[in-house]
Image (cartoon, rainbow, N blue to C red):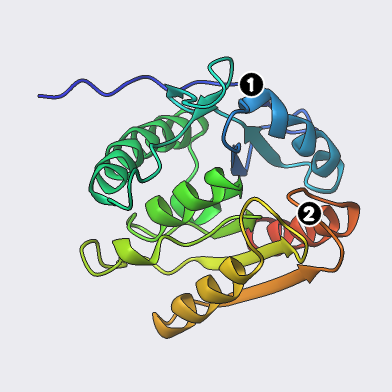
């Protein structure tokens, strides 16, 4: 049996001081780690007092920035084979982590949401759209749906999805959001997309507000 690499990262317990009623798992971008997105959780926490947050570090050292982490290998020389295998392996690790966190907090899947940035969005979409029972929702910032995966790994789960992307993103092109939305709608998934004019590969204040409102809707109300 293949040993599953342990995933861990900083946590933020509910600001209410009471037992968590929902969980948000935040998946960072390429070359960062969980400490990056847990700061976003501190912004959202006051409006979601019953929600716990955790921002795990990706399981692998980053190919381009050894001090950072990555969720999976990107394609090399136009070959998606290794990337697909890497994503599947990471999805298995991530699901094990999610199961452990849900059990720890005694929370069911319909009170779980994933938030991703860049590569974190990619692995969030890949894993959550194939995880049963369905989670409550996904917020994806500046990311993409790896379309080529879908014929081989069909979607089995349909959580609500919010995609937010800067129009001037020079890392993951803005067109990736439009392509993801089209594909998700075709799969019968409820998806909302928000463009941020003039924004690069980043999250701005309006994007944070939209993400927080979405999470409050799918988790708290």
Res 116 seen here: yes
Q: Secondary structure at mark 1?
A: loop
Badge 1 is on which residue?
Answer: 10
Crowding at label 1, few (<14), some or many (≥20) Cα neighbours within 10 Å?
some
**Count of numbered tags:** 2
Q: Quadrant of the C terminus?
A: bottom right
Instruction: Compare residues 74 and 9 and report the one nearer the observer.
Output: 74
Residue 194 vertical position relative to residue 72 in the rendered view, above or below: below
Q: Position of residue 165 (x, y in %)?
A: 71, 62
Q: Position of residue 106 (x, y in %)?
A: 48, 36
Circles 1 and 2: CB atoms closer than 8 Å:
no
Residue 23 vertical position relative to residue 11 in the rendered view, above or below: below
Q: Position of residue 58 (x, y in %)?
A: 49, 28
Badge 2 is on which residue?
Answer: 200
Residue 137 vertical position relative to residue 12 in the rendered view, above or below: below
Decide which of tag 1 and tag 2 comes sooner along the chain: 1
What residue sits 53% from the left and 45% below the top?
Answer: 119
Q: Is residue 92 left or right of residue 17?
A: left
Instruction: Compare residues 181 and 168 and report the one nearer the observer.
Output: 168
Q: Quadrant of residue 192?
A: bottom right
Crowding at label 2, few (<14), some or many (≥20) Cα neighbours within 10 Å?
some
Q: Position of residue 38 (x, y in %)?
A: 71, 30
Q: Residue furthest left?
A: 1
Q: Is residue 159 left or right of residue 210?
A: left
Q: Residue furthest top?
A: 67
Res 221 seen here: no
């Amino acid at each position: 049996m293949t040993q599953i690499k342990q995933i861990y990262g900083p946590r933020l317990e509910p600001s209410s001081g009471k037992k968590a009623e929902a969980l948000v798992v935040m998946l960072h971008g390429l070359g960062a780690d969980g400490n990056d997105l847990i700061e976003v959780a501190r912004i959202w926490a006051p409006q979601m007092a019953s929600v716990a947050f955790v921002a795990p570090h990706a399981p692998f050292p980053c190919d381009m920035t050894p001090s950072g982490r990555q969720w999976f290998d990107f394609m090399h020389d136009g070959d998606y084979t290794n990337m697909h295998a890497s994503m599947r392996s990471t999805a298995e690790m991530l699901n094990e982590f999610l199961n452990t966190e849900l059990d720890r907090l005694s929370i069911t899947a319909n009170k779980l949401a994933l938030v991703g940035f860049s590569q974190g969005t990619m692995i969030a979409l890949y894993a959550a759209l194939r995880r049963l029972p369905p989670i409550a929702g996904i917020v994806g910032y500046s990311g993409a749906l790896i379309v080529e995966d879908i014929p081989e790994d069909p979607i089995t789960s349909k959580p609500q999805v919010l995609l937010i992307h800067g129009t001037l993103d020079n890392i993951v092109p803005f067109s990736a959001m439009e392509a993801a939305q089209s594909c998700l709608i075709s799969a019968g998934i409820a998806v909302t997309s928000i463009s941020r004019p003039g924004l690069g590969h980043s999250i701005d204040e309006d994007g944070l507000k939209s993400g927080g409102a979405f999470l409050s809707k799918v988790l708290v109300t």
